[in-house]
Image: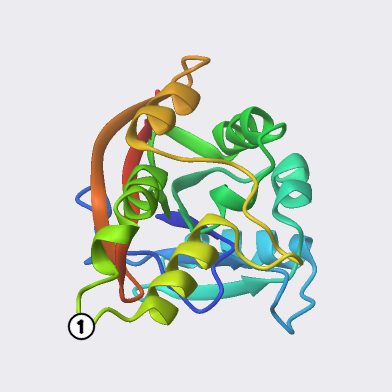
Amino acid sequence: MRILNIAAGKFNPLVTPDMNWLEPNYVLNIDTSYFDKTDPEEIEGDMQEWESDGSPISKYAYLNIDVFEFMERCRMKFGAVSIYRFLEHVSFTQVEYFIYLVSTVIEKGGIVDVIVPNYRILAEMIINEENHYNVPDFNFHAWNILLTTELLNEPSCPHASIWTVERMKKFWELEGRFKVKTQQPAFKFDGRDIYLRSLIERV
């Protein structure tokens, strides 16, 4: 299976019920933080060669390119797409276009695996914050770092769209290209349990 890992950083795609990790996969990791300046055309040729050879082992490729540009120009189709802690950085004015682009690079029946901060959990943390002030071991500094980074992030790379269980379903199903299959509203990822994980099917 071809797997596209958007804004991958150092994280590999997680196992999902729809991914057969016993079979070889070609995982294309895309992130502008990579040193690698491989040409996208080289990746395309390498992927086709890997498939034609019937390789018995999985392969991981790394591509330094803007993901919007990649999806706009990409001719390849993927069986699965992973998007971890990136969708919240997509401007609310571009969310629908981003989802459309994802629909153009994934096969029918393919699964999009999305992890974003769950703003319902974060909002409840703010609302109930004062209840923790008189707790002796309450670490306000750590609490504030978690809230601020997950709500706003750094000014150089801000969070620009808001996600909850309901919003995920609303946006991804808006134009009939996707169907939200399952959602985990308090998913633990990278040491924090404030994330929403959604598995979304291309229909």
In screen coordinates, is 128 left or right of 45? Answer: left
What residue sits 73% from the left and 51% below the top? 70
Give percent across and percent down for residue 26: 47, 65
Q: Is residue 23 at all visible to an observer of this figure?
A: no
Judging depth in this view, the residue of 31 and 170 nearest the camera is 170
Task: Determine whether 99 is above or below 81 in the image.
Answer: above
Give percent across and percent down for residue 118: 38, 48
Residue found farthest to the front: 134
In screen coordinates, is 9 left or right of 44? Answer: left
What residue sits 31% from the left and 76% below the top? 191
In screen coordinates, is 152 left or right of 133? Answer: right
What residue did someone put label 1 on? 136
Q: Is residue 137 at all visible to an observer of this figure?
A: yes
Regarding mark 1 in the picture, which secondary structure is present there? loop
Give percent across and percent down for residue 20: 24, 57
Task: Determine whether 45 is above or below 159 in the image.
Answer: below
Task: Determine whether 86 is above or below 136 in the image.
Answer: above
What residue sits 51% from the left and 39% below the top? 106
Judging depth in this view, the residue of 197 and 92 nearest the camera is 92
Give percent across and percent down for residue 135: 20, 75
Judging depth in this view, the residue of 127 and 112 nearest the camera is 127
Which three-letter amino acid code belongs to the residue tagged 1? Answer: Pro
Judging depth in this view, the residue of 136 and 122 nearest the camera is 136
